[in-house]
Image (cartoon, rainbow, N blue to C red):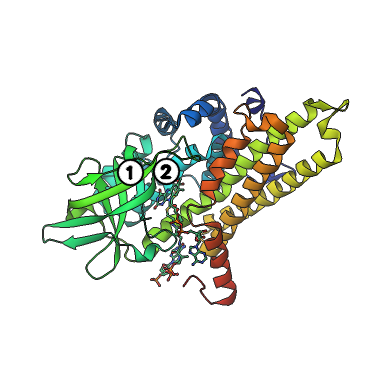
Amino acid sequence: MQATIQFIAPDHYLVDDLYTSEHKIVRSSIRDWVNRSVKPIIEDFNEKAEFPHHLVKEMGEMGILGPFIPQEYGGAGLDHIAYGLIMQELERGDSGIRSIFSVQTSLVMFPIFSYGTEEQKRKYLPKLATGEMIGCFGLTEPNHGSDPGSMLTRIVDKGDHYLLNGTKMWITNSSVADVSVVWAKDEKNIIRGLLVEKGVPGFTAPEIHGKWSLRASVTGELVFDDVKLPKENLLPGVQGLKGPLSCLNSARYGIAWGAVGAAMDCYDAALRYALERQQFGKPIGAFQLQQKKLAEALTEITKAQLLSWRLGTLKNENRATPQQISMAKRNNVEMALNIARETRQILGAMGITRDFPMMRHMMNLESVITYEGTHDIHLLITGHEITGIPSFI
Ligand code: TGC
Ligand code: FAD
């Protein structure tokens, strides 16, 4: 805990000069909050595999949930670089905490804001922004993960209501969510988005236990057994797979930033340790092999910081393509995972304990490299763009 609270952010290329004073104020307030409210408790919640529910309320009180949603709906009206910096700081704390935030912001508030009716926006967004309500996003199914277009979950139009049937799996926030954004096919095989509130008859959300990753975040199923939904629960503004995938663009963008935070945390802890720990009469940081690990980590963090910043400027100009986002998500998550593994080795045996963050980040990042599109799927998205030939099918 001590090592993390002394955290010094690596900034080898003076990337800070690229941020506005507003970006730096936002980052500094989240950094302080993570030091104060996340770092001291996260190892316990991770070990107990418990969801730190109270942190959602605290994020709401700080006004950061839905940072790019306009203020009239309860958001902060910030730009995408500010959103990225929030993600970076949260994931420096823990990927599970960043996950809770990503889902609430990019996968729940974003589709309601972008595709919802005025009534839906007024009903849900302000409460999601304060943390009074928690949301989740149901796309993946037990038999359809990388290929969500083949989903089996269905809605049938019954005149005055829809009947929803199906199962979603691996859903972040599932059992704690007050509202679920659920993607299902209609009778014409068109994917539609629906809002399902907790407690409606026929809807259950069992939790998945036994995870070695994202232990401080809830993951579960969404099971719909003849769930009657009022017609006004349909998100009218989008049809087809591009609906959920457009939400993923926002979430994947944030993950590209978040991964930098996890890597920075590992690098900082390892550097501090390498300068303090003595072997053969010297700090281990004096040995070339340990310097190599640190130098490579700093190089990769610097490249990822620049990639994220550039992507953020494109996103602010509405010019970031899904393919650019895929490249950044893929690159930065792999970078963070490699740094977690390499920096853990710098700590020797100490690196496997909960006194240092590397093992927790490493285990978390195994989920991050899998969700929001696997590492391989993002590579294939780039391959598709280069050649014009999709190789998914
Ligand atoms: P394909 O034929 O390529 O496309 C179907 C339609 O979708 C459009 N599209 C996109 N639109 C917006 N953004 C994107 N990124 C888009 N990608 C594709 C496309 O233009 C087309 O539109 P239209 O109008 O022509 O119909 O679709 P495909 O079925 O061949 O699949 C392509 C593939 C494999 C890339 C896609 O399905 C994919 O990305 N799969 C990965 C699935 C995934 O990422 N799941 C994530 C679930 S949510 C989650 O993990 C949350 S974790 C949360 C946390 O805790 O942080
Ligand atoms: P599969 O699709 O079965 O893939 C297995 C392997 O096959 C992977 O290596 C994959 O890259 C490879 N593969 C698949 N297709 C191809 C292909 N065409 N070519 C080459 N290789 C291929 N989903 C949600 O909807 N909402 C959530 O909130 C959510 N939260 C999650 C939280 C956690 C902790 C985890 C672990 C997952 C979460 N997911 C969520 C699900 C996640 O998005 C999926 O796990 C992911 O999309 C991969 O699907 P899958 O696990 O079914 O793997």
Q: Residue at x 30, y 62 (%)?
A: 152
Could you tell me the amino acid type at mark 2? Gly
Q: Is residue 281 left or right of residue 11?
A: right
Q: Quadrant of ligand 1?
A: bottom left
Badge 2, how many Cα within 10 Å: few under 14, some, many 20+? many
Element type at mark 1: helix
Query: Can residue 23 be seen by looking at this rendering?
Result: no
Q: Residue at x 43, y 35 (%)?
A: 63
Using the image, tell me which numbered label, if any, was put on residue 74. none
Could you tell me the amino acid type at mark 1? Leu
Element type at mark 2: loop
Q: Position of residue 111 (x, y in %)?
A: 36, 53
- Circles 2, 1 touching at the beta carbon (< 8 Å): yes
Query: Can residue 369 be seen by looking at this rendering?
Result: yes
Q: Position of residue 189 (x, y in %)?
A: 27, 69
Q: Which residue is mark 1?
A: 125
Q: Position of residue 50 (x, y in %)?
A: 42, 31
Q: Is residue 262 above or below residue 276?
A: below
The image quadrant that residue 15 belongs to is top right
Between 97 and 293, the one lying in front of the other is 293
Residue found at the very far right of the displayed protein = 281
Q: Position of residue 320 (x, y in %)?
A: 54, 61
The image quadrant that residue 131 belongs to is top left
Label total for image: 2
- Quarter of the picture containing the N terminus is top right
Q: Residue at x 48, y 44 (%)?
A: 78
Measured in 3D between alpha carbons, the distance from the residue under mark 2 to the one under mark 1, in whole angstroms, is 9 Å
Q: Which residue is mark 2?
A: 66
Question: Which of the marked residues, 2 or 1, is nearer the chain's N terminus?
Answer: 2
